[in-house]
Image (cartoon, rainbow, N blue to C red):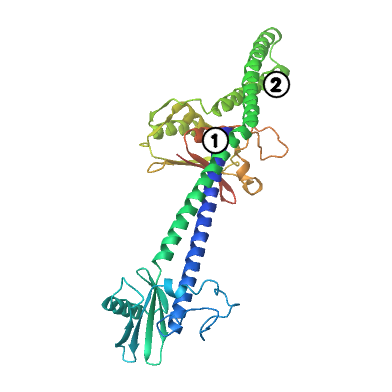
Amino acid sequence: MIYRLQRKFILICTASVLAVVTLMFGVILAWNISSMNRNMDMLADRVSEGGGRFPGILDEGIRPDKKPPRNEPGFDFITPETPFSTRHFTVFFDKNGEVAQTFTESIYAIDEDTAIEYAEKAMADGDERGWISSYRYKIFSTDLGMGVVFVDGSMSRSAMMQSMTIAGIVLVGCAALVLVLIFLFSRRAVRPIAESYQKQKQFITDAGHELKTPLTLILANLDIAEAELGSNEWLDDIRSEGHRMTELVGQLVALSRMDEEGDAMHSSMLPLGAIVGDIVSEFKSLAKSKGLTFQASIDEGVTYLGDEALLRRLVGVLMDNAVKYCDNGGEISVTLSGGKHLVMTVENSYSAVEQIELHRLFDRFYRADPARTFSGGYGIGLSMAKAIVEKHKGEITAYKKDSTHIGFKIVL
């Protein structure tokens, strides 16, 4: 069980690390795209402000009117070399939407026809800014009509892809390293707990075997004493408590063995519907003798691959629990259905259902009665039922059907 919890912890850590890495990669990608678009838009703005061409060389001597002031964000991005390194082209349209002029002297890969085609597509899209192929465009107004300036962003995109590839490799590498460290240190962290838990289980098993012998002798000597002295209430009480302790020890040992992950089940294809029907029939007469109403809807054709002894014990525990804790004159309902998942429910009348903690019913030695008055149970049966279900990779839950009924649902 400890190592099963360790695996869950590793899975949770893995999911958390991957989520953080994915989020970080997404934030970096979004930041880079936003930064690249902003830089490309600044270049497009400069070209559009220059009437379709870069507005002169930015130097300390001649300052064009459209040159951004030094305190404006992005001034350092546009340098005196920017007009020579920026590849761009511009297409102008008149007020009738006809092509009036094209500037393609600052681009090699685009001819006039292609420039017009890109510009018409940008105008048709209707967005002021955007991307067509590897070119960032901006639509702006002119005295004659509209203009579309395109700035080559292939180098910026290539640089961004390279940086994101490096960032992705670094993030994945860091995530892998963190997961390896989590795996290594988790084993070391749970080792003392696992050893302590193993010792507890071994103690229960050993104590159970050691207690069985004196209990057997006590009951045997009790029979001898009863034969010589005759039956009386004190001997009957001793026998009752002896049998109760024997049953409790047996359940503790069985529960401890079920916790062993390496304890293989004897699985075979079983006619589970018929098995459940037989066990329910055995409890049906007991329920009627106590004045309880009994209803059963069992699909006799259901089959299942599992351990017959464990599954019989599982159904027996649930039925015994239902009969034992059902209200006087109450009702018990059992259903079993097949399909993609095998589903079994056991419901019974229980007027105190509002007062119990449903999530704690499967805890060992938990009793809904705070006074722990003996009612024939030890608080182990449902723990055993849960262990059997988990052994079969299933799930068992307790639920409140209504204010007077409690139910248990098994999904295998």
Q: Is residue 347 visible?
A: no
Tell me the amino acid under the disc marked 2: Asp
Looking at the rendered image, the disc whose residue lies closer to the viewer, 2 or 1, is 1
- Disc 2 to disc 1, how far (Cα)? 43 Å
Give how far across and how far down residue 54 sits, in percent: 43, 80
Q: Is residue 349 left or right of residue 371?
A: left
Above/below status of 123 relative to 366: below
- Residue 398: quarter of image: top right
Residue drawn where x is 51% and y is 84% of the image: 66
In the picture as drawn, the residue positioned furthest to the front comes out as 61
Residue drawn where x is 49% and y is 63% of the image: 32
Image quadrant occupied by the C terminus = top left
Q: Between 120 and 319, which is closer to the camera in this rendering?
A: 120
Image quadrant occupied by the N terminus = top right
Give how far across and how far down residue 258 sits, in percent: 54, 28
Label 1 secondary element: helix
Q: Between 281 and 300, which is closer to the camera in this rendering?
A: 300
Tell me the amino acid under the disc marked 1: Arg
Give the label on residue 4, or none: 1
Q: Is residue 26 visible?
A: yes
Q: Between 124 and 13, which is closer to the camera in this rendering?
A: 124
Question: Pointer 2: residues within 10 angstroms few (<14), some, or many (20+)?
Answer: few
Q: Between 259 and 346, which is closer to the camera in this rendering?
A: 259
Q: Is residue 384 left or right of residue 37?
A: right
Question: Pointer 1: residues within 10 angstroms few (<14), some, or many (20+)?
Answer: few
Q: Earlier in the sequence, mark 2 or mark 1?
A: 1
Residue that mark 2 sits on:
237
Label 2 secondary element: helix
* Disc 2 and disc 1 in contact, CB within 8 angstroms: no
Above/below status of 65 relative to 379: below
Give how far across and how far down residue 287 sits, in percent: 53, 35
Residue drawn where x is 55% and y is 72% of the image: 76
